[in-house]
Image (spheres, grey):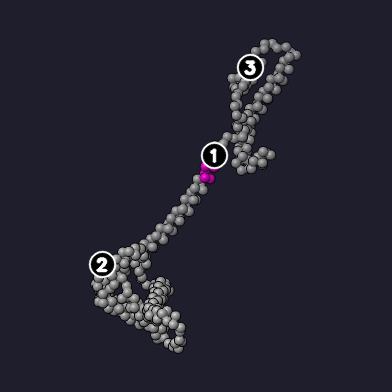
Amino acid sequence: MKVTKKQPKPKGTQKSADSKAVQEPTSFHTEFSGSRRQNDEQDQDELSEILTEKPKAQGYPHLAHRIRNIPQEIVTSKWSPPSQQVQDQVREIFTYAMRSVIPTRRDERRGTEAEILLRQVVRKLERRVSRMLLPPNAKGMHFDLNQLLERNRILESHLTPATHANELLKKEIKRAELELADEKRNLAELETNLKSARLEQKKQDRPHPLLRLPKNFKIQGDGPEDIGLRPSTGTDMSVFDNFENPDPDLGHILEQLRRSLESMQANHDQVQGIDEAIKYAKVALDDVLFNHASSEQYDSL
């Protein structure tokens, strides 16, 4: 504490000095209260950092965070500080938690560091227990260590089957996703094949270029009745047999003419059907070119 020598002051300032001397305890109390509030805020910040820090190891079951927003008016009016019994029960829980964590450290040095850190946290939590506000439905049984351990044992017995069921569900979901991916690939392949089949069917349904007629085309004088189309018949050679006593000069000519006509008839019978075969071959060749050649190649041919 720093001690300063009191200096003499004029009479006119004696009143102000007295009033200042009276106010010194008040300022000391205010300074002490501010320091205490500052320490509380610092402890709260440190505890918030410790409690909100995410653990590195996530391989063990842990509770998920759940936040409920409660109005400050309800907390102030209906919540109350814990009783001494509840405070003792909470301290017992802190001690049990600290003792159950420290033996898990195999390294002695790390165990010592963990014990020091946990003791600091526990001391800060214990200082805040008396200043905590609990809801009206919170009872002493909620902080009883034996009941909490039994409750944890029951929850763990329920958690193990639920965890196994969750793993099975994850495997089923993964298997269903793989099957869905295979079905999607098969569906895409079927859609591609369907498009190809429709294009091929559309291509086959198109008329041959030789059969394509311009729009608004009308047959005018080109029908079978209009041109008098009729099947050809062979030459009747019996007309030459009706001549009686032909002219000697014409007899030789008629005989040569008969033989020529018979030869022509025989030649015609031999080549009969070749025209149809040629037409069929042309149509088949044109169909092959139409299906396999490009438009430029087809037009050039």
Q: What amino acid is labelled 3 in the image? A: Ser
Location of the N terminus by quadrant is bottom left
> What's the distance in space between the residues labelled 2 and 1, CA to CA?
78 Å
Residue 202 is labelled as: 1
Q: What amino acid is labelled 1 in the image? A: Lys
* Residue, disc 2: 137
Location of the C terminus by quadrant is top right
Image location of residue 241, percent across then percent down: 65, 15
Which type of secondary structure does the marked residue at label 3 adopt? helix
Image position of 168 (left or right of 195): left
Span highlighted in magenta in the image: 195-200
**Residue at 52 percent of width and 42 percent of height:** 198
**Of the pair 142 and 11, the residue shown nearer to us:** 11
Image location of residue 289, percent across then percent down: 63, 40
Circle 3 packing at 10 Å, graded few (<14), some (14-19), many (20+), is: few
> What's the distance in space between the residues labelled 2 and 3, CA to CA?
133 Å
Which type of secondary structure does the marked residue at label 2 adopt? loop
